[in-house]
Amino acid sequence: MPIYNPPLDDIKFVMHDVLGAEQLSELNSYEDFSLELGDQILEEGAKLCAEVLFPLNQSGDSEGCELKDGTVTTPKGFKAAYDTFAENGWCGLACDPDHGGMGMPMLINTAMKEMICSANMSLGMYPGLSFGAYEAIHKFGSDALKDLYLPKLVEGVWSGTMCLTEAHCGTDLGLIKSKAIPDNAGSYKITGTKIFISAGEHDLTENIVHLVLAKLPDAPEGARGISLFVVPKFVPNDDGSLGERNGAVCGSLEHKMGIKANATALMNFDEAQGWLVGEPHKGLRAMFAFMNDARLGVAMQGLGIAEVAYQNGLAYAKERLQMRSLTGVKAPDKPADPIIVHPDVRRMLMLSKSVTEGGRALSYWVGMELDISLKHKDEKQRQRADDLVALLTPIIKAYLTDMGSEITNLAVQIYGGHGYIWESGVEQYVRDARIAQIYEGANGVQALDLVGRKMPQHFGRLLRRFFHPVQEFIEANQANPELQEFIFPLAKSFMKLQQSTAMVAQKGLKNPDEAGAASVDYLRHFALVAMAFMWCKMVIAAQEKLSNGEGDKEFYEAKIQTAKFFMERVLPESDARFKMVLAGADSMMAMDEAAF
C-alpha cells in the first residue's frame, strides 16, 4: 500500500528560511498574517490531506466516476471528504474575506495545493477548478455576478469549471464554434459542445458554475471574437436559491489513462442561459485569469505527485532486500542488503529528491511573488513581481510536470516488477502525472509562450526581472569560499542561458521556426538555471542554520548534500540543452513530409 507524509519540515524551511515569508505581513490586507499562523494552517491542512484525502486516492482510481441519466456519481467516500474539505473553509483559503474567504496569501495556497495534489490529485481538482472560476469572476465579473456567485464558490456549496476545448480545437481557441445569442432578459443563450471538461458534472456540490467561451453574433474572426460567460447547471434565483435546471448537460465521460476519479465530461449546451463576464469579445483576457491560476495549479500537480512518488520509492528502497552492496555487506544480519545501497537506486532517489526540493523552492517563490504582485503598496513593486510571475509560470508548469512524470516513472523503476502492479500504488502516479504535461497548455505550447511572448515582451523587461537578480546574486556571493562549488556551476550555466537567449532572439526574428525549434530546450535550460539559483539560496539558508547551531543538524546537512548532487548530476543537462538550442532548426525542419 502507498504512503504519504506531508513534508512540513521542507515546506517550513522554504517559507521561513529561504523566502523569508514573514515579509508578507507588510502587504495590503495581510497585516494580520504571521508565519506562525501560516504554519498552523498548513499543519491542519496536512492532517486533512493525509487522513481524509489520501486514503481515498487508490480506491477512487479503482472505482472511477459513473454517468447515469445525465448525473455523475463520484467514487465512494468522495462526497463526505469534499464536505469535510468545504466545511472547514479550505475552498476559500486564499479568497477575499468580503465573500467569506480566509484571505490567506497565495504562498500558503500554493503549499496547500502541493499537499492536496500529493494526497489525491483527482479529488483536489474539484475545488481547484472552483478557485479558478472564483478568480475569473472576482477580477472581471460585474458586482451582481460577484455577489451571487462568489460566496457560494467560497463556501464550496457550488463548484466551478473551465469550458474551452471543442472537438476541433484545443490550443487554437479562435476556432471555437460555440455561440451566444442575446435574449431579452440581459442574458444570453449558449449553444455548443465542449469536451475534456474536468469536473464538468458530479455529485459533490448542489450547483456547478461553468465558465464557457463562446462567440456573439457580431464577433470578429479568430481569438479577438471570443467572449466569456457564466453558465450555471441550475439557474440561481436572486437570493442564491436554485431555480430551474439549465440547458447544460453532460453527454458522456471520457475513459482515461489517469485521474479517473475526476469526472472529465463532454458538455452539451443547448440554449443554456448564461451571463457575460467582462466585456464582449474580451473573453480570453478574463479566461487567462483562470488559465494562469490553472497553470500554477498544474505545476503543483507535477510537484505534488513527484513528492509522493519519491516518498514511496524511498520507503521501498529502504525495505527491499536484493543482492549485496558493491563495496561489501551493509546488513550482515539480513540475507541481502536493502536496495538503497546500490548506486543506480541512489541515482534515482537523489534525482527525485533534488528536483522535488528545488521545485518546491522555485514554485513557492513564484507563489510569494504572486502575492507581491497583488498586494504590495508600491505599484512599481507590483509590476516587477507580476512580470516575474508571468515569465516563470510557463517554465514551472512545463518543467515540474515533465519532471513529475519522470519521477513517477523512477518510482516504478525502483519498485521493479512490483511497481508495475496496481496494488503497490505507484503505477497510478505514472498515469495520473501524465495529463499534467498536456492540459492547461501542452508543455510545447508553454515553451512557445516563453520564447514567442514572454521573451520579447516590453523589449525584454520580463527577462530582466530574472536575469538581473541572478547576476547580482552571483556577484555578491562568488568570493565566498563556502559557496564556490555552488555559485560557479550556476554562473557557468547562467552565462550560457544569456547567450542562448540572444541567439534565439536574433534567429527567431529572421525565421520564427528557429525560435520554435529551440523553445523546448531553451525552457528546460532556463528551468535548470532557476532551480540552481534556488538551490544556492537553500544552501545559504542551511549553512546559516548550521553555523548558528539551530535546528536539526542532519536536516540542513542533507540540504547541502542534495544541492551538491543537483549541481554535479542534474544541472549539467543545461550544457546539452545549450548545444541543442545552438544547433538551430535545419535538421528538424529540412526533411520533406513524405520522407517521414
Image (spheres, rainbow, N blue to C red):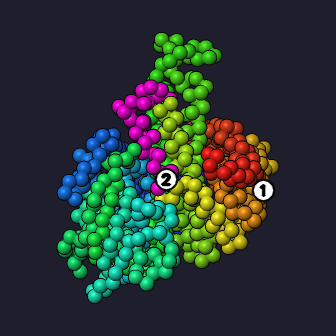
Is there any visible trace of residue 271 in the rendered image?
yes
Q: Is residue 160 left or right of residue 436?
A: left
Q: Quadrant of residue 421?
A: top left
The x and y percentages for residue 503 are: 77, 59
> Residue 525, percent across and down?
67, 50
User: What residue occupies the far front of the structure in this picture?
Assistant: 594
- How crowded pointer 2 is (Cα within 10 Å; few <14, some 14-19, many 20+) is rated as some
Q: Which residue is mark 2?
A: 438
Q: Residue furthest right?
A: 479
Q: Is residue 89 left or right of residue 402?
A: left
| Circle 1 residue | 499
Identity of the residue drawn at 38% across and 55% down: 125
Q: Residue at x 60, y 31 (%)?
A: 347
Q: Which residues are magenta?
A: 414-439
Query: Residue 427 magenta-drawn?
Result: yes
* Element class at badge 2: loop
Among all residues in the image, which is located at the extreme bottom? Answer: 184
Q: Quadrant of the C terminus?
A: top right
Front position among marks 1 and 2: 2
**Disc 1 marks which amino acid?**
Gln
Q: Position of residue 546 (x, y in %)?
A: 63, 42
Q: Earlier in the sequence, mark 1 or mark 2?
A: 2
Element class at badge 1: helix
**Figure check: 325 above or below 283:** above
**Disc 1 crowd, CA 10 A, few/some/many (<14, 14-19, 20+):** few
- In the displayed structure, would residue 338 be above or below residue 208? above
